[in-house]
Image (tube, rainbow, N blue to C red):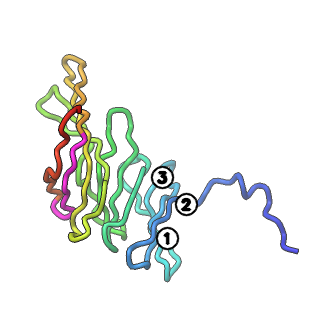
Amino acid sequence: GAAGLPIESFFKPYDFTQMKLSPNGKHVALLVPHQGTLQLGVLDVARRETRILALKEKRNVSWFDWAGNERLLFGLEQTGLLGGGLYIVNRDGSQPRPLIAPLVVHQSNVVQWLNTSMLSKVTDRADEILVQSDEAAVDRTQAKTQSLQLLNVYRLNLTTGERRLETANPGRV
């Protein structure tokens, strides 16, 4: 008969999680434990080689998705007031950059943060996606937080980072 798996196999740390096949089927994006955080990795299916896309940010990648065959969108885990932001990177790890920064400082006293997540790809435009953003602001001099809590929908260009309002939240209804 077939030998059973040793009990240790069920309790060892995982090597990767949350796999997603690229649109052309040549690569698999996945999350990989790396230096104490969950980072993006890309498996080349034909070569059976995985490249870890080690990011400068030492926070966990909370979600990711393919933006075509060559680029990946991802968000980072929220830490305290620092929202996740929305980032893009080439599948070889080059050119990582924020599309929507998680934190914006206005003047010296007001800090605004954006909690942004992807809603949908735009079927007729490979370089655009729909995102939702929840914006909040803190006045550090008065220790007051004003949460706008209005999830608006924006069309985001993946090349330029330009964000255009697609649908405004009508407010509390």
Pick the front one: 146 or 7:
146
Which residue is located at x 27 percent, y 43 percent? 102
Asked where in the image residue 16 lies, by quadrant, the reply is bottom right
**Which percent across, then down, holds residue 123?**
26, 69
- Position of residue 154 relative to residue 53, above or below, is above
- Position of residue 104 relative to residue 126, above or below, is above
The amino acid pointed to by label 1 is Thr
Pick the front one: 69 or 12:
69
**Distance from label 3 to label 1 (Cα)?**
15 Å
State yes or no: residue 133 in magenta.
no
**Which percent across, then down, holds residue 106?**
13, 34
Which residue is located at x 82 percent, y 65 percent? 4
- In the picture of the structure, the residue carrying the numbered disc 2 is 16
The amino acid pointed to by label 3 is Leu
Mark number displayed over residue 38: 3
Span shown in magenta:
151-160
- Quick one: SS at disc 2? loop
Residue extending furthest top? 142
The amino acid pointed to by label 2 is Phe
Q: Main secondary structure of the magenta part?
A: strand
**Which percent across, then down, holds residue 154?**
19, 52
- In the picture of the structure, the residue carrying the numbered disc 1 is 50
**Distance from label 1 to label 2 (Cα)?**
10 Å
Answer yes or no: do the residues labelled 1 and 2 have beta carbons within 8 Å? yes
Left or right of residue 35, residue 129 in this image: left
Which residue is located at x 53 percent, y 59 percent? 17
Q: Quadrant of the N terminus?
A: bottom right
- Position of residue 164 relative to residue 41, above or below, is above
Left or right of residue 165, residue 41 in this image: right
Asked where in the image residue 87 lies, by quadrant, the reply is bottom left
Answer yes or no: do the residues labelled 2 and 3 have beta carbons within 8 Å? no
